[in-house]
Amino acid sequence: GVMAQRSQAGLEKTKAAFDVMAQRSGAEMEKNREVINENFVELKTSCSAKIEQLQSLPISERLKFAAMGLCGLLVCCFWFPILFLIGAANVPDHCPVNFDVWMRVYGLVPISLSTCMSVLVILFTNGSDDYHRKF
């Protein structure tokens, strides 16, 4: 009797509270979606402007950017291959697979390829040449 009525009343209050929260969160989500879309358009425009600015630079200036990127990568990410090389040196000889070879390759190849691709993109980006711009 009384407990069931209280339980039913509590359930209805909880349901009403959830409905209010759902309406509020729906409006907030729509507002957040609009802000995200505005920020994305602004970011895309900003990136396009920076790419056009980079494309208009002479090759000597682009070489400076490539060198700065390479130095930054080496300063910030030198530890990545070192961890893998140290780990490869500590692989026991009785390991049935060539895990040490995998660690050496995985420690060096991804960072080397990303560095080379970054330098190539910076060097070969040319505002008048659509082929290299699609790099």
Image (cartoon, rainbow, N blue to C red):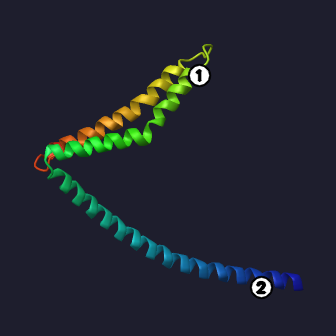
Examine the image and state in which quarter residue 44 appears: bottom left
Judge left or right: residue 62 versus residue 101.
left
Residue 90 circle label: 1
Residue 5 or 117: which is nearer the viewer? 117
* Residue type beneath disc 1: Asn
Write the residue at 31% across / 44% down. 69
Write the residue at 30% across / 35% down. 116
Residue 113 appears in view: yes
Q: Earlier in the sequence, mark 2 or mark 1?
A: 2
Q: Is residue 32 above or below residue 73?
A: below
Write the residue at 81% across / 80% down. 7
Determine whether the residue tagged by mark 1 lies in a helix, strand or loop. loop
Q: Position of residue 134 (x, y in %)?
A: 21, 45
Closer to viewer: mark 2 or mark 1: 1
Residue 1 appears in view: no
Examine the image and state in which quarter residue 119 appears: top left
Residue 73 or 32: which is nearer the viewer? 73
Instruction: Tell me whether circle 2 and circle 1 mark residues in contact (CB < 8 Å).
Output: no
As drawn, the residue found furthest toward the left would be: 128
Determine whether the residue tagged by mark 2 lies in a helix, strand or loop. helix
Judge left or right: residue 88 versus residue 51.
right
The residue carrying mark 2 is 9
* Residue type beneath disc 2: Ala
Check the picture and name the quadrant holding the N terminus. bottom right
Q: Position of residue 35 (x, y in %)?
A: 40, 72
Q: Is residue 10 above or below residue 135?
A: below
Q: Position of residue 38 (x, y in %)?
A: 35, 71
Residue 49 circle label: none
Check the picture and name the quadrant holding the C terminus. top left
